[in-house]
């Protein structure tokens, strides 16, 4: 039987024992950095693969550096801890893996990052589709603008800055849409609440530069690589204006949770033909094959977790 376990204070324990105090700094101020990593179960191969694990931990450690957070592990240590945790859980299904580095000091009235203890915790839960929609999704332009690098660094996954994404996603879903598209302070397209954004025009793919305040997405990087190297499609990073999305041929979103998700409409206007576009389909099929460990050319992106049985 799979068990819900967590890595907590240096040990693997049942998740019910992984508890922090209400005095914890991160709980009050969002002074934490997290990751979302996927474990993908391949039924035919009877194997569990973690996708681009080292890249996720490199980004976590960048966030730690930004937040003056010292944790006593490097990327290799964190990968080994993850494998150990997944082995002790024993899940044989698709997983969402959540590493969290946080200011663990039990001290509330303190707005400095220096001289505060930090810790690292990790958990994994069974996880299927993130966006609950068949085919293409319906998006809206958020009235919440994406946080700017002059406010909170958006390129790393700092917990506190997720209030921005949460406000946008809440507004969109309360209004009946599946996802929000956020603009920068200047009105350029930035990204979805939890996904990077791509647009297709005349057979070429465009995506905003990371400097337009989106997260340095690992799925974004994978999509760019697969589009160029596997599908032979040109990918251009450049500023994108909102009105371009209304007139383009396809829009799709990329993220660890969302995979590659085609957008069928924006602000109730159909994009292209209004359904799942041909380039998004090709890229999504290629991506799913890669993350499942079924494409030998990209097996370097997949870490197999040796499981019993
Ligand atoms: N943007 C935001 C705001 C996100 O939360 C995520 C999910 N991590 C992404 C983009 C996509 O990043 P990745 O492909 O690394 O999951």
Image (cartoon, rainbow, N blue to C red):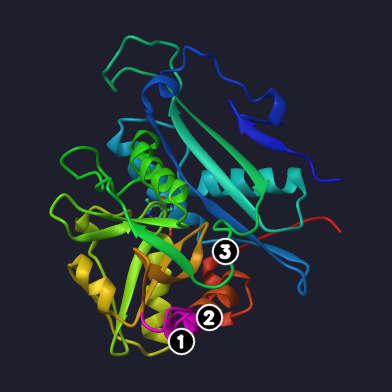
Q: Return the residue at label 1.
A: 278
What is the span of residues highlighted in magenta in the rendered image? 272-283
Mark in the foreground, 2 or 3:
3
Mark in the foreground, 3 or 1:
3
Which quadrant of the picture is home to ligand 1?
bottom left
Q: Return the residue at label 2.
A: 286
Name the residue located 39 percent from the left edge and 81 percent from the top edge.
227
Q: Return the residue at label 3.
A: 133
Q: Along the polypeptide, which appears first: circle 2 or circle 3?
A: 3
Q: Nearer the viewer, residue 179 or 116?
A: 179
242 vs 127, left or right, is: left
Q: Along the polypeptide, which appears first: circle 3 or circle 1?
A: 3
Query: What is the x, y in percent for residue 215?
Result: 33, 53
In the picture as drawn, the residue positioned furthest to the left comes out as 186
For ligand 1, tell me if the residue under mark 3 lies within 8 Å: no
Q: Is residue 302 above or below residue 78?
A: below
* Dot 3 crowding, Cα within 10 Å, few <14, some 14–19, many 20+: few
Under circle 2, the secondary element is helix
Q: Is residue 7 above or below residue 225?
A: above
Name the residue located 71 percent from the left edge and 26 percent from the top edge.
16
Q: Along the polypeptide, which appears first: circle 1 or circle 2?
A: 1
């Amino acid at each position: 039987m799979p068990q819900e376990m967590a890595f907590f204070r240096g040990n693997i324990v049942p998740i019910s024992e992984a508890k922090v105090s209400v005095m914890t700094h991160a709980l009050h101020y969002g002074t934490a950095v997290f990751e979302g990593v996927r474990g993908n179960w391949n039924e035919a191969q009877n194997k569990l693969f973690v996708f681009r694990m080292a890249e996720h931990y490199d980004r976590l450690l960048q966030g730690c550096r930004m937040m003056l957070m010292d944790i006593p592990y490097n990327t290799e240590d964190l990968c080994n801890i993850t494998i150990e945790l997944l082995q002790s859980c024993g899940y044989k299904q698709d997983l969402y893996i959540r590493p969290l580095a946080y200011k663990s000091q039990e001290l509330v009235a303190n707005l400095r990052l220096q001289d505060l203890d930090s810790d690292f915790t990790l958990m994994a839960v069974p996880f299927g589709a993130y966006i609950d929609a068949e085919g293409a999704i319906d998006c809206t332009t958020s009235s919440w603008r994406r946080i700017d690098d002059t406010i909170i660094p958006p390129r790393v996954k700092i917990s506190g800055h997720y209030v921005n994404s949460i406000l946008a996603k809440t507004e969109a879903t309360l209004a009946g849409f599946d996802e929000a598209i956020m603009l920068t302070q200047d009105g350029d397209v930035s990204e979805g609440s939890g996904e990077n954004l791509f647009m297709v025009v005349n057979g070429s793919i465009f995506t905003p530069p990371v400097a337009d305040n989106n997260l340095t997405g690992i799925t974004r990087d994978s999509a760019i690589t697969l589009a160029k190297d596997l599908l032979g499609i040109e990918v251009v990073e450049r500023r994108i204006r909102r009105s371009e999305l209304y007139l383009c041929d396809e829009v799709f979103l990329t993220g660890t949770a969302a995979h590659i998700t085609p957008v069928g409409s924006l602000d109730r206007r159909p994009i292209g033909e209004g359904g799942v576009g041909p380039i998004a389909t090709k890229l999504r099929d290629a991506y799913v094959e890669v993350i499942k460990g079924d494409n030998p050319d990209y097996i370097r992106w997949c870490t197999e977790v040796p499981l019993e049985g």
